Image (cartoon, rainbow, N blue to C red):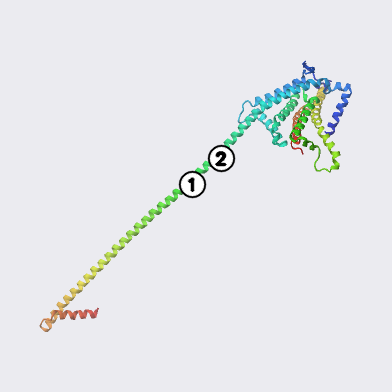
Amino acid sequence: MANPLEQFTIKPLIDIQMGGIDASLTNAGLAMVATVVAITAFLVLSMRGRALVPGRWQSMAELSYEFIAGMIRDNVGSEGRKFFPFIFSLFMFILFANLLGLLPYSFTFTSHIVVTFAMALFVFLGVTLVGIAHHGLHFFSFFVPSGVPAVMLPLLVPIEILSYLSRPLSLSIRLFANMMAGHTMMKVFAGFIVPLGVAGILPLGVDVLLTGFELLVAFLQAYVFTVLTCLYLNDAIHLH
Amino acid sequence: MRILLKTVPMLGLSLVATPAFAAGLPQLDIAKFPPQLVWLVITFTALYVLMSRVALPRIANVLEERQNKIDDNLSRAEDLKRSAKVAAEAYVKAISDARAKAHASIRQVKEKADADARTRQDDLNAKLKADIASSEKAIATARDEALAGIKDVSTDVAGSVIERLIGHKAKDDVVLDAIEAVLKDRA
């Protein structure tokens, strides 16, 4: 039986070295490029008609636009509007990476902790900088819960700081673990299909169900990552 | 979920610590981190630029155009509704004006007819009164003449009767006086 973790192996396709840094195009890098191409093609081609009454593809493009616009409006407010291109890119990037990763023989780069952690760290640092830019040193009052007796503060402030610092970890590990677990599970069941012969219909059925479930997870994880980014942004802009 | 989130990093750390497991889990192969990060930066930057410069403005344009069109149509409908209302008001006003004018004309004609009728009636009444008056006068004259005639006749008759009775004529004025006295008694 094939190792269910083998699908996560990074395979260099083109060797590139940039100033001593390994910048080779790997299967992960190729999947990232494919994701960007797919998103751009989807949005640009479906909006080609610029129809007053949208067709199916244009409706989907407009729907994704309004979905993220509504998410920012509800969670951040009007100050969030200038972050719209970033939030939108983030959502589409994760969503398309998850969805394209479900295609057989493709690669799911969101199942790699280094990628999800880099994105989460970028969001974390960006949000913190936005908070400091908005409020200056007053931003650090974020770690002091309001309406708490002063005696409790030495205990609560470190907890608040710790929970703040754990944000990029939980953000990145949630996405990475969900994608990795789903794909591993599908592979494990897929590995049983041929050896079991006629009874292989059972793991095949499970894989069919899992595929549907993974489609849900693909969307849900992209949504969770994005909505949490919005909530962090809201915290940074409005504090408590 | 929470517990999973807490245990996975610990698991990850322990996997890193033991090279045998690290070899088994491709996600923890640190040597493969740099190319992934480099391409993540390249592709996400490209995506951000494409989205913010190309894709999103197009969608925003289309949505804005549609909103404008909807607003435009709504305001035009509002205008049409307003002008329809104005027209309806003008119609109602014209109808009531015409009705009022018709009423006024009818009343005017009726008044004129009434006045004419009254004048004619008055004329007729006056004429009839004049006729009656003149007729009465004529009758009175006729009666006076008749009465005068009667006096003459009765004077003649009385004169003749007296002549037959006494053999000579009585003076006319004496007879007339006597007759008048009789007539006065009777009247």
Letter of the chain that mark 1 sits on in the rendering: B
Do we see residue A209 in this rendering? no
Q: Residue furthest left?
A: B167
Closer to the N terminus: mark 1 or mark 2?
Answer: 2
How far apart marks 1 and 2 lie (CA) works out to 21 Å
Answer few, some or many: residues within 10 Å of disc 1's Cα (few below 14, many 20 plus, some between 14 and 19): few
* Position above or below: B57 against B126: above
The x and y percentages for residue B104 are 42, 52
Q: Chain of mark 2?
A: B
Q: Decide if residue B171 is on the left or right side of residue B20.
A: left
Do the residues under discs 1 and 2 have CB atoms within 8 angstroms?
Answer: no
Q: Nearer the viewer, residue B174 or B89?
A: B89
Q: Residue at x 68, y 31 (%)?
A: A65
Front label number (1 vs 2): 2
Tag 2: amino acid:
Glu
Quadrant housing residue A217: top right
Q: Which mark is residue B92?
A: 1
Amino acid type, callout 1: Val
When the figure is inspected, residue A147 is found, relative to residue B176, above or below; the finding is above
Q: Which residue is mark 2?
A: B78
Looking at the picture, how far across and down is residue A163, in whole percent?
82, 34
